[in-house]
Amino acid sequence: MQQSTNPGIKWGIIGGILLVLLNVLTYVAGPSVLFSWWNSLLQLTVFIVVAFLAGKEKKKELGGYISFKDALKPVFTAFIIGTAIITVYQYILYKFIDPQLVDALKQNLLDSTAKWMHKFKAPQEEIDKQLDELSKTDFNVSFAKSFMDFLKGIIFYFVIAAIVAVIIRKKPSQGI
């Protein structure tokens, strides 16, 4: 009897390491790069590709056919493991390596919010109200906040994993 494997474990570790390396590079490049929208999009793309590769490996292991359920397991596992790795890295970065990065994040968010609200021609009083609310937000990193962010990420990534699993699944053709 052949042992069934979950390539999501391997690909989750690979994805987590890739995301940490990407974060280190963008951190070194500075807050404007680290907090840019395109960096977030790049990280999401890397994560989706890695999860897709986990599902494709499982499909190959099963002889080229895979159900939605069988595809979802390695894909979602890759997301869970990768998210855990990047969450731990970011906790260490914000809490111990560069605690002042929280202030840079807050300022970047204030600046980008103001920019986008001006771009969409929001009334100045609404812009001021939103910026005031945002400036009162506590951006400090704690274990509890990091864990909650991890859980929120997992919910988001479950949806992405389900989409990837639908794309990967392949049923054997039915004979007549």
Image (tube, rainbow, N blue to C red):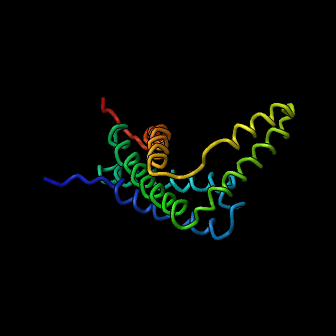
- Residue at 69% across / 41% down in the picture? 134
Residue 24 location, x and y as percent?
57, 68
Residue 34 at x, y percent in the picture: 65, 60
Please state which of residues 1 and 118 is positioned toward the viewer in this rendering: 118
Res 88 quadrant in image: bottom left
Q: Residue at x 43, y 58 (%)?
A: 85
Tally of numbered tags = 0
Q: Position of residue 67 (x, y in %)?
A: 34, 38
Residue 172 visible at all: no
Q: Nearer the viewer, residue 141 or 39?
A: 141
Of residue 96 and residue 8, the one placed in the foreground of this image is: 96
Q: Is residue 170 visible?
A: yes
Q: Quadrant of residue 132?
A: top right
Give the residue displayed 42% in from the left and 53% down from the top. Answer: 84
Identify whether 89 is placed above or below 44: below
Q: Is residue 99 above or below residue 131?
A: below
Name the residue rendered at 44%, 38% in the picture: 162
Name above or below for residue 22 compared with residue 124: below
Q: Is residue 70 left or right of residue 155?
A: left
**149 horizontally vs 76: left or right:** right
Residue 115: where, in percent of width, then height?
Answer: 81, 45
Q: Quadrant of the C terminus?
A: top left
- Residue reaching furthest to the top: 176
